[in-house]
Image (cartoon, rainbow, N blue to C red):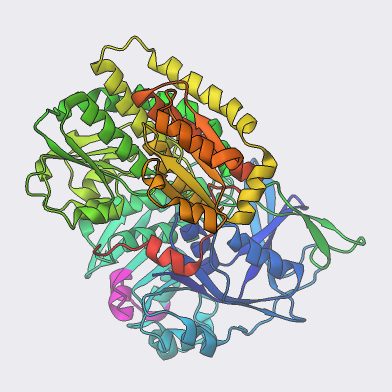
């Protein structure tokens, strides 16, 4: 499923008191898609632009948000449509005008009739795509009338409606849309023109499934099943610029509709409105319709021509999300172990007769694996780390407890995997919001062990998680140290481990070795003897970032013929995790692996080594990405891949 915007691309120029601030992509339907992409929704644009710099920026502004732009057609010798938004300060307030002509040279870069190819669009739309429009021009109408998809339209202007007869306008809108959003200005125009008493009559005339009316500082109205639901503005925010607020409002509603499978439950409407209001409060705090999600592109003149004709843009320095996440790792781990989640593990009441499932996926599987080892060590009970789908194919009749690991707390795979399994004794380790988790999973609040607090609510951004892997493991290690009356100061242990591996990894791995690994595209990882958690985590991060491929070997199992692959295919680059103590077999194995093996050795043995090496794994993948100039927290995935990533059905 994708949410797809359709229409000609537009670039917005932003000026303040006569000075050009910068430019960005624009247009309502594409702004909606930009917001949804930022929320993690699979998105695409079907549109056109010129082969000029404006067109490049219109596309780049979407690509930076991971919107699929493969279906944007670039026309040679066509000038991309441009709006010029000018702001003026009056009594400490901003007023603005939006025009198609440049305020300096009066140049108009705007072709009138849409240039989208409706035949190509209709052919390439998938059956489950959700289509977003912001006007009813003839080309859009052809797509609307010749597809069976869910369709959403956001009409913020009525000038195009003035050109239509009443019948034409009604035919264009009636029974065509899943959702229609109007702003109050448009509904007032329609009520007067069509001689209707109220917006409910408008809803019954156009017959969408769901209709919303935005009223700015007066809140909004939802209309569904012939009933109105009105909401007052909750948070206004510090208003710098109101442009884009309506686009963001609709985006948030669409996201909530998707999350609820387009089932319109009036009991959820207030929450939907609150979510939209929170987003619009952020939008109005920034300059520009997309200022809250990507900054304006800074431009400068070329050859003294007006910037609307000829310019170059200064490429902004990209922020390494991986760098931010690794630099905040220590703070986030320490914050996690100081929450109530760390103490509440006692309340689960593990005992030696228990059979327990520890379930995680992606980076969370490493946390689940480590927790299972801790509980087995402490209580001697059956503790089984598992991936979600594997749970469906085993006999779970005698499972006593289930512990789920999910950073968000609402991971679809994990929730679906345990239906009917130890339902009263299902617990979740998470940083998600309690209210959201209870609402979506039905798990009792007392069974949610959240390491989120008012001062620890910021979350990592990106697909690969450092905190989401290490923090849950840290909580269980603290439980282990408490139960064994260890004299180790856990906070000092964390800081020492992080400081050690932050400095040590670069000394252990030469840059040329990493580049040779890249050339071979495949490395061996060796697990066993309290190194398994780190190995599973590193394999997951390397695979998900697309740096190269990995084969995991259990250390002794390698000797039962797996060396054939190592020798015959010249697959001789390895990363070998080990605890402090070296077994006799291990000495022989390390001698065999030779100089192409990177040895990651802990200063500890046992469960302390297991956790210490998990820290090492974070710095390993960070350093490898840094050498290869890859931000491993932000891999680029294909559209087809995202379909399975966002899959929400049965496992």
- Residue 450 appears at what percent x and percent y? 29, 34
The answer to which of 578 and 83 lies nearer the viewer is 578
Residue at the (51%, 77%) spot, across then down: 135
The answer to which of 462 and 88 lies nearer the viewer is 462
Q: Is residue 542 above or below residue 605?
A: below
Q: Is residue 139 above or below residue 577?
A: below
Q: Is residue 622 above or below residue 341?
A: below
Looking at the rendered image, the quarter that the N terminus falls into is bottom left
The answer to which of 638 and 604 lies nearer the viewer is 604
- Residue 647 appears at what percent x and percent y? 34, 63
Residue at the (61%, 49%) spot, across then down: 517
**Snapshot quadrant of residue 444:** top left
Visible residue check, residue 290: yes
Visible residue check, residue 430: no
Residue 223 is inside the magenta segment: no
**Snapshot quadrant of residue 454:** top left
Extent of the magenta region: 193-210
Instruction: Give the left or right position of residue 435, taking residue 635 as reference.
Output: left
- Residue 505 appears at what percent x and percent y? 59, 31
Instruction: Give the left or right position of residue 370, taking residue 292 as reference.
Output: left
Looking at the rendered image, the quarter that the C terminus falls into is bottom left
Residue 209 is inside the magenta segment: yes
Instruction: Give the left or right position of residue 548, taking residue 484 as reference.
Output: right
- Residue 600 appears at what percent x and percent y? 51, 32
Residue at the (27%, 16%) spot, across then down: 482
């Amino acid at each position: 499923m994708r949410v797809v915007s359709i229409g000609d691309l537009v670039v917005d120029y932003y000026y303040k008191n006569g000075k050009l601030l910068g430019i960005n992509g624009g247009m309502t339907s594409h702004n909606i898609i930009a917001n949804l992409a930022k929320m993690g929704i699979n998105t695409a644009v079907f549109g056109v632009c010129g082969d000029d710099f404006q067109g490049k920026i219109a596309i780049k502004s979407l690509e930076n948000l991971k919107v699929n732009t493969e279906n944007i057609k670039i026309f040679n010798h066509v000038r991309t449509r441009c709006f010029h938004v000018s702001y003026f300060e009056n009594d400490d307030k901003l007023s603005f005008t939006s025009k198609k002509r440049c305020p300096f040279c009066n140049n108009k870069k705007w072709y009138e009739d849409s240039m989208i190819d409706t035949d190509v669009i209709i052919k390439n739309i998938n059956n489950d795509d959700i289509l977003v429009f912001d006007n009813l021009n003839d080309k859009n109408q052809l797509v609307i009338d010749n597809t069976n998809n869910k369709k959403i339209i956001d009409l913020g202007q009525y000038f195009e409606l003035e050109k239509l007869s009443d019948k034409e306008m009604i035919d264009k809108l009636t029974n065509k849309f899943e959702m229609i959003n109007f702003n109050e200005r448009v509904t007032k125009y329609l009520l007067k023109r069509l001689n209707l008493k109220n917006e409910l009559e408008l809803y019954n005339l156009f017959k969408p499934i769901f209709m919303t009316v935005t009223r700015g500082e007066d809140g909004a109205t939802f209309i569904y099943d012939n009933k109105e639901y009105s909401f007052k503005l909750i948070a206004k925010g510090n208003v710098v610029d109101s442009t884009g607020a309506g686009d963001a409002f609709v985006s948030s509603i669409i996201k909530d509709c998707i999350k609820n499978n387009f089932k319109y439950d009036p009991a959820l409407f207030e929450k939907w409105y609150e979510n939209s209001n929170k987003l619009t409060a952020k939008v109005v705090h920034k300059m520009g319709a997309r200022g809250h999600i990507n900054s304006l592109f800074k431009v400068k003149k070329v050859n003294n021509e007006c910037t609307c004709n000829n310019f170059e843009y200064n490429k902004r320095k990209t922020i390494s999300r991986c760098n931010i996440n690794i630099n905040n790792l220590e703070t986030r781990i320490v914050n996690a172990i100081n929450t109530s989640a760390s103490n509440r593990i006692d309340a689960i009441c593990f005992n030696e007769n228990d059979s327990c499932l520890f379930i995680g996926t992606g980076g969370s599987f490493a946390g689940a694996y480590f927790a299972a080892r801790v509980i087995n060590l402490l209580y001697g009970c059956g503790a089984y780390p598992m991936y979600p789908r594997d749970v469906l194919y085993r006999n779970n009749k005698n499972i006593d407890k289930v512990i789920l690991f999910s950073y968000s707390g609402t991971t679809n795979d994990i929730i679906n995997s345990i239906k009917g399994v130890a339902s009263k004794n299902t617990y979740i380790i998470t940083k998600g919001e309690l209210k959201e988790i209870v609402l979506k999973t039905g798990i009792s609040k007392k069974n949610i062990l959240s390491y989120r607090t008012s001062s620890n609510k910021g979350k990592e951004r990106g697909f690969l998680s450092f905190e989401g892997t290490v923090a849950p493991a840290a909580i269980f290690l603290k439980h282990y140290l408490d139960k064994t009356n260890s004299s180790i100061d856990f906070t000092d242990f964390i800081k020492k481990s992080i400081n050690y591996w932050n400095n040590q990894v670069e000394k252990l791995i030469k840059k040329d070795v990493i580049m040779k690994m890249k050339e071979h595209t495949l490395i061996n990882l060796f697990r066993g003897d309290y190194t398994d958690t780190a190995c599973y985590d590193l394999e997951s991060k390397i695979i998900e970032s697309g740096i190269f491929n990995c084969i995991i070997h259990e250390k002794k199992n390698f000797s039962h013929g797996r060396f054939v692959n190592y020798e015959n295919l010249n697959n001789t680059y390895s990363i070998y995790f080990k605890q402090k103590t070296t077994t006799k077999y291990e000495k022989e194995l390390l001698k065999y692996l030779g100089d192409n093996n990177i040895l990651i050795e802990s200063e500890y043995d046992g469960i302390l080594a297991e956790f210490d090496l998990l820290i090492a794994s974070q710095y390993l993948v960070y350093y490898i990405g840094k050498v290869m100039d890859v931000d491993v927290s932000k891999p680029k995935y294909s559209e087809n891949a995202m379909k399975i990533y966002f899959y929400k059905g049965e496992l």
